[in-house]
Structure formats: C-alpha cells, structure tokens
Amino acid sequence: MAIKQFKTESKRLLDLMANSIYTNTDIFLRELISNASDALDKRYFLSLTDTNIKSEDLKIKIYADKKEKTITIIDNGIGMSKEDLENNLGTIAKSGSFEFKENLDEKEKVDIIGQFGVGFYSAFMVADKIEVLSKKINEDKAYLWTGTLDGYEVKQAKKDDFGTTIILYIKDNSKEKKYDQYLNIDNLEMLVKKYSDFIRYPIIMNIESYGENGAKETKETTVNSMVPIWKKPKKELKDEDYQMFYSTNYYDFEKPLSTLHYKVEGNTSYSALLFIPSVRPLNYFSNDYKLDLKLYSKGVFIKDEAKELISDYFRFVRGVVDSDDLSLNISREILQENHQMAALKKSIDKKIKSTLVKMLENNREDYEKFFEQFGQQLKFGAYDHYGANKDELVDLLIFKSSYEDKYVTLKEYVSRMKEDQKEIYFASGPSIKAIKELPELETVLDKGYEILYFTDSVDEFMANVLHDYDGKIFKSLQQGNLDFDTKEEKEKIEKKAKDNEDLINKIKEELKDKVNDVRLTNRLKSSAVCLVSDDGLSFNMEKTLNAINQGAVKANKILEINPNHELFKALNSVYKKGNDIKDYSILLYEQAQLIAGLPLEDPIAYSKRVADLMLKAMS
C-alpha cells in the first residue's frame, strides 16, 4: 500500500507538534498513557450496557527494548478500526475521545482525559517512526497504522486480543538531546510516577531487581498509585497518612500547622489537598524559591508551580489541586480559558483565608507561629498593587504591641482605644527592644496609649496603603506633630517656644544644612532630644527605598528638643552669655541621629567634637 500524506491542514501542525508546541519532550509518555486510559474508559463504559464486552483486568503495559531502540505501550481498551485509524491518526486534531464523549447523553458522560486528538503526535518528538497495531471491540480484523513525519499507511494485520499496541522507534541521539535516555526503564518509571501516577488503571512495567542470592530478576510490577490521596474519602485517612504524603513530597518533616483536604462541586469542580507549613523554607524570600503547588486534571499531572491557582500572598501553601473541568490546549501544558483558572483561584484563596481566620479565632498559639513565619507575606499582600487586596487581608494581620507585649489584631487594638483617641499609634525599628528604648515613646506610654511595634521593612509602607482601620488613621510616633496634648500642655509649650525663640532660631541656623526644622516638644520626658521625620516619608522608609534605589530619596528631618531637660537649660545659659553654640548644636543633632539609629555623617569629626568639649569642660 502506498504511503499516504497527512492532509495539508495537518502537515504544518504535525511539524509544530514534533518541534515546538511541546516544550518538554518528557511528556510524550504522559500523552500516550492518557490516550490508553481513555481507551480503557471507553471499554469499561460499553461493558455496562453490553454483557458480551468484558471489563476485567483492564491495564496498561510499557516495555523498553534497548537493542531494538523501541518503547512499547499496550492497552486492552476499546481498540480502533481501520476507519478510526484513518480519521483519528490520519487527520490531526480530530479526536475520537472528544467525539465519543459528545455522542453520549449528558447523564452518561464519563471522564475522558484526551479530548484534542493531538497528544499522540507528541511521540514524534522522540521517535522517527511509530507503529499502532489495534483491534476494535466486537470486530474481527486488526489493522496496523505506520507513520513518520513524511506520511502514513494503514494495512490489515494480525492481533489476537482487543486493544492497541503502540511501538515507538526512538530517534538517534543528537547534540541537543539524548533520546536513548527514554530506553532506560528507571527513567520511564520515573516519568510514569511524575505524570501518570494517579491514572485509575494499573500501569505495568518490567522492573529489574536482585533476589536474595544476588541474581538479577525481572518481573512485571504495577508502578502507579492509581488512587491519589486527595481523591480518597477523608474518613478513610488518618493523620499519619497526611503526614507521610507531606513529608515524602515536600521533604519537610515538621508537622504542617494545618491540612486542608476538601472537594468542591459546582460550576468549577475540583479536589484539593493543601498544607500550611509550620516552618518557612530557608530560601522563601529569595528569587530561588518556587511555589510548591501542583495542578492535575483527572489525575494526570499538568504542571508544577501552578501560580495561576493561588494569590501570591498565599504562596506559602503547598499541595495539589485536581480539576475535572479544565479546558487544556493541545499540549495540556497551557490552560485555554482564563476564567476557569480565575474561578479556581478565587475558590482556593477563599478556602485558605477561612482556614486562617478559624486558626486565628480558635487556635491563637498556632496562628502566631504561622504569622512569625509567613506574616510578612500577608503584609506584602496588603501593600502590593496599591492595596488592592488590603480588605481581604487586613483582619489576618497581627502585630506585637505595648499591651502586655503580645500579638494583637487591629480589631483588638481599636476595641481598647481611649474614648477621645482618633489614631492608631505605631513606632518602627529594627527590633522590639530597639523600639522600646526610643525616648519619644515615654510620654505616650505614660498617658496610657497602646503602641504597635513595626519591625518589618514593609510595615510602614503597608500602614500608608491601609491608611486607616475602622476609621482610625495610622499615625507614627516618629513623624510629624502628635495631637494628644491637653490644651494646657499646648499653651505651655507654645509659651516656652516663644520665650526661647532666639535660641531656637540660632540652632536652626547652625543646622540649616542638616535638618528642616527645630522645635520644642512635649514628646520627650527623660531625653534631651529626638529626631523625627515630617509626615510622609519616614526614616525607615527612606532606608528601605535607598537600599533599592541607591540613595534616591531623603526624609525631612526635624530636631525636637525637650525644654524641661537640664541640657537645654545649660545650652540656654551658654547662649545668653554670648558663647558660640555651633558645636553644641551639632552635637545635639548627632546625639539625636544615634538615638534614631541613623548613621553619623562624619564619625571622626563627631569624636573630635566630643573630645574638645570634654577638654573645655575640664579646663
């Protein structure tokens, strides 16, 4: 029989199939196993209404022959007639599986993995010739389809049993690709476990092992699990089963803080097994970290790092999602309909959030452990995209506060606010210890106000984006003016500022290149000075942005002086005697810099200034 050419509209697609549509040649085996699974599904379905068709012992077999350079995939499914071979393998993208499913009544439809009629041709990525020997259920004749990239032929052949045998003649190695790796049975077994472990029928391979006497043995072994743990009823599983799956797949032997095993049915149906780890991976905040969320469709592995399934602020979640409803493109590697993924993502995000809310409400200790590991991710989520997700995340945020040195939610903070308090007070620093030592907090604490401690670089950016909670605006105790003085306190500080106006103006003049303003304050109690920024950009935000932009921005600096401190009184006395106060003014500023945790502009000059003043005092 003469070689037939593939139809014109199929030829270009076939070249694409072999050379560019599939980015990963490993998946040829997944496609052929999925097709074999479809054939077994069809036979099983027909057996339900035709007692002459048997459906016992349905299986898939895979063999590799290094000498002949062939891989053989055998199934005892429905098989194909001559017409099927011509139509389904001679015309690319005409799918027998899809047509079979479409011809069923709605109530009869079964799960069919391969619906696109092109997965078979992925085998041409690794093979230069393919033979398909098939005999269809209830037919007497068998046929052999033989194809290369140049064309194909179909002829009558001999086959005793029903089903299909596919033989791939593996390509010779090239500089770019070692095709003989697929002739290694261990490699094939690994590919089966990776991509097809949860196909519902046994996949049998000849696996080599060594007996007790050391002799090599080869025996047929089922290599796939068939039923994934996430498809099993929860009542059949124990905590140990989940822990075994988690530790085996994610190499984390710490028990996860929460396990989410659930099934959703509706417009978008899927099963999921998700884990919230108890310990953050070492590379979590590095560019090397990869999302550990796998996507399956009907038990067939589709992709790792399924970023489309989950919001970035929940990327600490590990697990698997398996949906029967996904519309995949011809390579099964790219999802065609974004609305399907959007619906999945919305549902998965909702489940994760509800789990965290319950943990926060019912198991505060575990939630605080979680937040210490992954809370920064939630903060980034609330800040990112100009706060697009802040309403979704704000009630999941907790902060250490001056109230019993415990974590508090914003809701808890607001519930304890003083009757006349209009703002949520916070202070920032590299650690809680450093924040507690800030002199500008003393008066606020004395007045009985609660303070949130911000220790992450993202905290102030997040607070700016949140702006307020329940109508209470976030206010830094290290920025701008504080509006908690009584009328009497305000009048006193205004009078002292007026009485010392000349001295303050002189200090401003000496520090005109260093600060934007100098003023007296009620903010301080035991300290002489502090350095605050104007409303807007804070010192911590400046530090973070400059680390990214290399010195691009500066916060406005304000030197605040405690008029009740002995140092200010002494400086006033020196000034009234007509002495130069330049060095004293600069020292006040440098002292404030050190307290604020800011680097000195010239440490050597600072040391010399201190030494000179010490000598002057001693003389």
Image (cartoon, grey):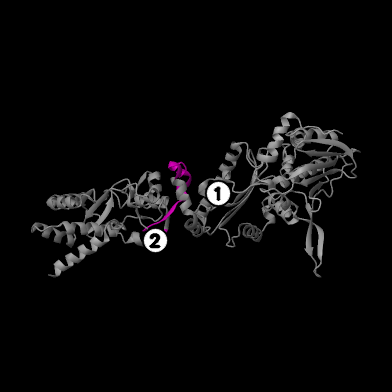
Say whether residue 400 is magenta.
yes
Q: Is residue 610 above or below residue 37?
A: below
What range of the chain is rendered magenta? Answer: 384-406
Say whether residue 55 is magenta.
no
Residue drawn at x 49%, y 57% as measured from the top left: 373
Between 283 and 572, the one nearer to me in the picture: 283
Observer able to see residue 562 = no
Between 575 and 165, the one nearer to me in the picture: 165
Answer with the quarter of the image where residue 612 lies: bottom left
**Which numbered tag is attached to residue 382?**
none
The percent position of residue 16, horizontal first and vertical second, equals 68, 37
Q: With 398 as the anchor, is 254 left or right in this view?
A: right
**Which numbered tag is attached to residue 352?**
1
Give the class, few, some or many, for how many residues have Cα within 10 Å of label 1's Cα (few <14, many ≥20): some
Q: With 563 as the anchor, is 123 left or right in this view?
A: right
Q: Is residue 170 above or below residue 253?
A: above
The type of residue carrying mark 2 is Asp
Residue drawn at x 79%, y 32% as measured from the top left: 87
Q: With 88 as the anchor, is 535 left or right in this view?
A: left
What secondary structure is marked by label 2? loop
What secondary structure is marked by label 1? helix
Location of the N terminus by quadrant is top right
Q: What residue sits right under mark 2 in the picture?
A: 405
